[in-house]
Image (cartoon, helix red, strand yellow):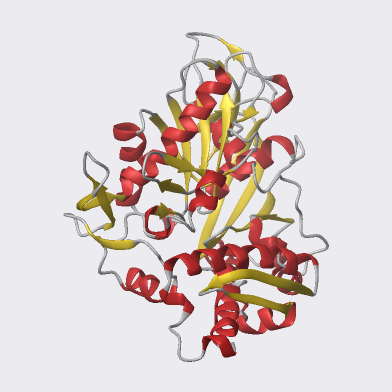
Amino acid sequence: MAGILAIGMFLSQGIEDIGARANLIGVDFGSSFMKATLVRPGKKFAIVENTAAKRKTEAMVTLGKENRLFGADSLLASGKYPLTTFAELQRTFGEQFDAELVQKMKEHRFITNEIAADERGVVAWKVTSAGSGGEESGEELLHSEEVVAMLLQYVKMLAEKQAEASVRECVITVPSWFTYDQRLMIRDAAEQLAGLSVLQLVHENTAAAVLFGIDKVDKEAQNHTVLFYNMGGMDTEVAIVRYSHLNVSEKSKKLTPYIEILAEAHERDLGSKDLDLVLFDILADKFNALKEREGKPDLRTNPRATKRLLKEAAKIKEELSANKQASVKVPELLDYVTLQLTLERAEMEEKASELFARVTRPIEAALAKAGLSMDEIHQVELLGGGIRTPKVTELLEKALKVKELGVHLNGDEAMCFGSAFIGSNSTMNFKVAAVMLT
């Protein structure tokens, strides 16, 4: 993507209406959470809050017997409806069913939903449909776009409620490794099913880099190079970005910010959810080893128990990020047997050694693509929930050899605010300041 990009002025200045009254949203479509920023003429940028007044919503949906549940409600219902709760959608979105990646996920990722190939050979979800009297009437396929569209419709509804007006236009973040077909599928989900008009799809780190350039870079900086390290829920992405200022007009001495994406790299299946799975395995093995479970089936074969233990694993991960040990108690996890123990952080780190060995790979790959060394990187910025893991930051400090690992951006909201800035440029409804992005 090259050319002059006009980006909205600083957050507190709001946006001036210069044409038709319109609203848009910047949507961070993450693997774990979805966040959105609302842009309205003459108003400040605003995070879209969900029905619980939270600034981020779990990227999951549950199809109950009578309604759809989203976010925290879906998480709570996932134990009751494990077969019709859909989460971590980016992992399988647009992937060919017979791909090695998908087959490995079926074996090791504890997908409690039943997946199948649709007419295109792409991953879809098997669900049981209900008859007019509520009885089960057979199976049907739910396409990936349909599930994503449900989430986008929910975000659109929240934005319209907050704006007290219709919202149609949007910019959506996508992983840098999404293929052309996957991008088309996201666009179709938004435009054909969710009632949105997609102005642009932008890489997650690009959106964050734009926000960083507007707010955190010296207004006269030249060739200031920043490495963005983003460990999210299901992957790790790295971008190397150079910031400069150019005089693009002979009539004015005013400098225009210039943001150049030098290189990007990624490591799939290296995120905070992957650490959840390591903890899940530890807990499942300990549960299976209890005397009360002798001769009984593996806990992993039970969808409801699996969902409950996965939720517990996520909680334990957060506790181990702040403490060297954590207490675990899951009452009547399966067959009235309770799991109760104390887990050490060291045990988790040992079991996750394969994951930690890959932490610096995308850094090395991005530097190689950009033809740079770490000595030529002026600043490092960390993003994503995975960086809260002590072992991750320890490994990054050793590898990057910089004075500071920066956390100057709000890692939860940088992408949706950045995409909102980019969106404000993509329509004539707003007066914005020029920034060049390549």
For residue 309, above or below residue 121: below
Q: Is residue 423 visible?
A: no
Q: Position of residue 405 (x, y in %)?
A: 77, 59
Q: Quadrant of the N terminus?
A: top left
For residue 340, above or below residue 145: below
Q: Is residue 97 left or right of residue 412?
A: left
Q: Is residue 319 left or right of residue 158?
A: right
User: In this orientation, which residue lies closer to the viewer: 289 or 313?
Assistant: 289
Residue at the image point whose x is 68% and y is 42% from the top: 212
Q: Position of residue 142 (x, y in %)?
A: 27, 49
Q: Position of residue 236 (x, y in %)?
A: 56, 62
The residue most toward the left is 119
User: In this orientation, which residue lies closer to the viewer: 280 or 119?
Assistant: 280
Q: Position of residue 390 (x, y in %)?
A: 75, 69
Q: Answer with the quarter of the image where residue 123 lies.
A: bottom left
Q: Is residue 426 visible?
A: yes
Q: Answer with the quarter of the image where residue 436 lies.
A: top right
Residue at the image point whose x is 50% and y is 64% from the top: 307
Residue at the image point whose x is 58% and y is 34% from the top: 50
- Figure label count: 0
For residue 212, above or below residue 13: below
Residue at the image point whose x is 58% and y is 81% from the top: 287
User: In this orientation, which residue lies closer to the viewer: 351 or 363?
Assistant: 351
User: In this orientation, which residue lies closer to the viewer: 377 or 236?
Assistant: 236
